[in-house]
């Protein structure tokens, strides 16, 4: 049974308070505390290393699989491997995410390596939220790696969100996109204090008529530091686009580092980046409606990251 703090973490990162319907694996302080498979989605423990295999049967439609991780002990460190084998003709949603509550003096860290093997004509939506809390001196560290291999006519949309609480994160995403397939990545990120966040995306558009769109929206406050790296390689007739929009505040720093490489005459690759402070006229307009400057800033940030 989860206590109230653990249920709160679970709700923040996965939108659930207890056992969800269907297939799920709930991990608490480096151990799986509850797991269930469904008729079409099977979850099994790995034999050779820490982690699970998730197998989704061909033709599975409108099912959701939950695999959240929560920690509420100080000094917990783990490396977990989760592999997703998604059959042909599927339409599924996968809800991951990690919440760390650390009130101690030792660092707590979760490093998760997720690999997706997506079959032909399949559609996958992947939701990942990161959240940290606790007033201890120990850091809350998350380093997620996501690897995606897409067969023909497949579609994947990833939504990754990190709003406050994580001291350090290095987020690596690597995608290989097949013929007539599309990979969409939407990142939302807010850092504050002395936090550090690095996002490193690498997409190989290997298939004819493959597509990818990487969209990052970020806010850096106080003395935090962010680095956004987007590498897109056009290896066939394809379209690739990366976009970094960021708000910088206080003494923060933000870097956007693109690398686009066309290895085929019919590859079309675009990178856009815009980094700047909150416009003064936006603040004045909201303050004229009765908001304080801080309230106006928060409203603008919330709208930007929505």
Image: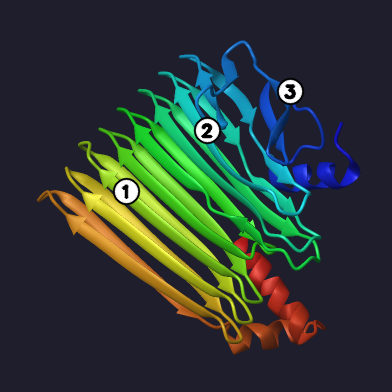
**In the rendered image, which residue does mark 2 sit on?**
82
Q: Mark 3 or mark 2, which is nearer the start of the sequence?
A: 3
Q: Residue at x 58, y 19 (%)?
A: 44
Q: Position of residue 90 (x, y in %)?
A: 47, 21
Q: Which mark is residue 21?
A: 3
Q: Residue at x 77, y 37 (%)?
A: 16
Q: Position of residue 180 (x, y in %)?
A: 28, 33
Q: Name the image quarter holding the N terminus.
A: top right
Between disc 2 and disc 3, the foreground one is: 2
Q: CA distance from mark 2 to mark 1?
A: 20 Å
Q: CA distance from mark 1 to mark 3?
A: 34 Å
**In the rendered image, which residue does mark 1 sit on?**
203
Q: Position of residue 126 (x, y in %)?
A: 54, 39
In the drawing, does residue 234 fall left or right of residue 70?
left
Q: Secondary structure at mark 1?
A: strand
Answer above or below: position of 140 versus 251. above
Query: Is 23 or 292 nearer to us in this picture?
Result: 23
Q: Name the image quarter holding the C terminus.
A: bottom right
Q: Quadrant of residue 247?
A: bottom right
In the drawing, does residue 304 fall left or right of residue 19?
left
Q: Secondary structure at mark 3?
A: loop
Q: Quadrant of residue 86?
A: top left
Q: Mark 1 or mark 2, which is nearer the start of the sequence?
A: 2
Q: Mark 3 or mark 1, which is nearer the start of the sequence?
A: 3
Q: Residue furthest left?
A: 265
Q: CA distance from mark 2 to mark 3?
A: 20 Å
Query: Is 47 or 82 nearer to us in this picture?
Result: 47
Mark 1: few, some, or many residues within 10 Å (few <14, many ≥20)?
A: many
Whether label 2 touches label 3, CB < 8 Å: no
């Amino acid at each position: 049974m989860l206590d109230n703090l653990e249920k709160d973490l679970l709700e923040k990162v996965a939108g659930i308070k207890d056992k969800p319907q269907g297939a799920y694996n709930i991990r608490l302080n480096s151990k799986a505390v509850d797991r269930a498979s469904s008729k079409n989605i099977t979850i099994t423990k790995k034999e050779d290393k820490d982690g699970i295999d998730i197998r989704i049967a061909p033709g599975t439609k409108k099912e959701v699989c939950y695999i959240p991780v929560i920690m509420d002990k100080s000094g917990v460190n783990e490396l977990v491997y989760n592999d997703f084998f998604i059959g042909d003709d599927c339409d599924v949603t996968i809800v991951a995410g990690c919440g760390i509550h650390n009130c101690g003096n030792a660092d707590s860290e979760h490093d998760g390596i997720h690999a997706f093997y997506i079959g032909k004509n399949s559609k996958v939506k992947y939701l990942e939220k990161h959240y940290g809390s606790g007033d201890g001196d120990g850091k809350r560290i998350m380093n997620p790696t996501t690897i995606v291999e897409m067969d023909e006519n497949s579609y994947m949309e990833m939504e990754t969100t990190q709003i406050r609480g994580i001291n350090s994160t290095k987020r690596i995403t690597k995608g290989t996109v097949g013929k007539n397939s599309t990979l969409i990545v939407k990142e939302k990120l807010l850092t504050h204090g002395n936090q550090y966040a690095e996002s490193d995306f690498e997409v190989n558009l290997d298939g004819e008529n493959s597509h990818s769109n990487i969209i990052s929206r970020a806010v850096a406050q106080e003395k935090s530091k962010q680095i956004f790296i987007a590498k897109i390689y056009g290896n066939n007739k394809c379209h690739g686009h990366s976009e970094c929009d960021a708000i910088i505040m206080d003494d923060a720093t933000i870097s956007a580092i693109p690398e686009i490489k066309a290895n085929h005459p019919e590859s079309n690759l675009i990178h856009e980046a815009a980094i700047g402070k909150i416009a003064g006229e936006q603040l004045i307009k909201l303050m004229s409606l009765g908001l304080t400057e801080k309230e106006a800033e928060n409203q603008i940030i919330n709208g930007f990251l929505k």
